[in-house]
Image (tube, rainbow, N blue to C red):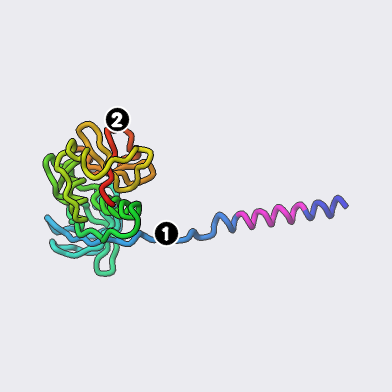
Amino acid sequence: MKSRLKKITIFSLVFLFIFSTTLTTAPKKEVKAAEGYSGKIFRHWTKLRTGKSKKAKVLKTLKVGTAVTVYGTSGSWRKVSVAGKTGYVPKQYVYVGTKAPSLTGSTYKKGQTVAEFAQRFVGNPYVWGGTDLNRGADCSGFIGSIYRSFGYKLPRSSSELRSAGRKVSYSQKQPGDIICYNGHVAMYIGNGKIVHASSRKTGIKISQRANYRSIVCVRRIVK
């Protein structure tokens, strides 16, 4: 009897080992990049590389004006594809298209579309007084230019934006809403985060906490 139980125990352990190994070593499902958006190479020719490093293998040399599909920004690099090749180029040489998608659906869906569009420009520079989404914008210039791409004309300064659209409570905020602070303005993108033209040092970036400083008001632009 003991011998039989011993054999059963050994068999069970072997089965569990094989089963757990299969689970941990099975190939993970490939996570595909989100659908890209249009862009082009500007300012200077550059090289498409296999990785985010100047030492990475060069896939292709891209001249000014080359159309690319942009998939996002990581540090000082943008992931793009061109002529069937996907790689990385320095972000300062990629102009991101400013043609915005159409706003359809509910107010929430429209705001989400605006917020997603705004995130395309993360990594671009902060320029005091600027309104250019690629060459540089300040906080209110960034917000105004994003909404102008959708056909909305907003006040220019951060203080004037406190009266734009309609007021909603912080607890009712949704993607696309404008978060107004003293001397600053940002856009809520969901999950407690904001995108904003933060400073000369950081440029346009995503911050993890919308309430990282005292909030004056929240304004909703889309209807």
Q: Which residues are magenta?
A: 9-20
Q: Residue at x 34, y 38 (%)?
A: 169
Q: Position of residue 118 (x, y in %)?
A: 26, 50
Q: Mark 1 — residue?
A: 31
Outermost residue toward the bottom?
83
Secondary-structure class at tag 2: loop
Visible in this render: residue 53? no
Q: Is residue 150 left or right of residue 105?
A: left
CA distance for labels 2 and 1: 38 Å
Secondary-structure class at tag 1: loop
Compare residues 200 and 63 and report the one nearer the observer. Answer: 200
Residue type at numbered disc 1:
Val
Q: Position of residue 189 (x, y in %)?
A: 32, 46
Queried whether the magenta region covers residue 40, the answer comes back as no
Q: Mark 2 — residue?
A: 214
- From the image, give the main secondary structure of the stretch colored magenta: helix
Q: Residue at x 31, y 42 (%)?
A: 194
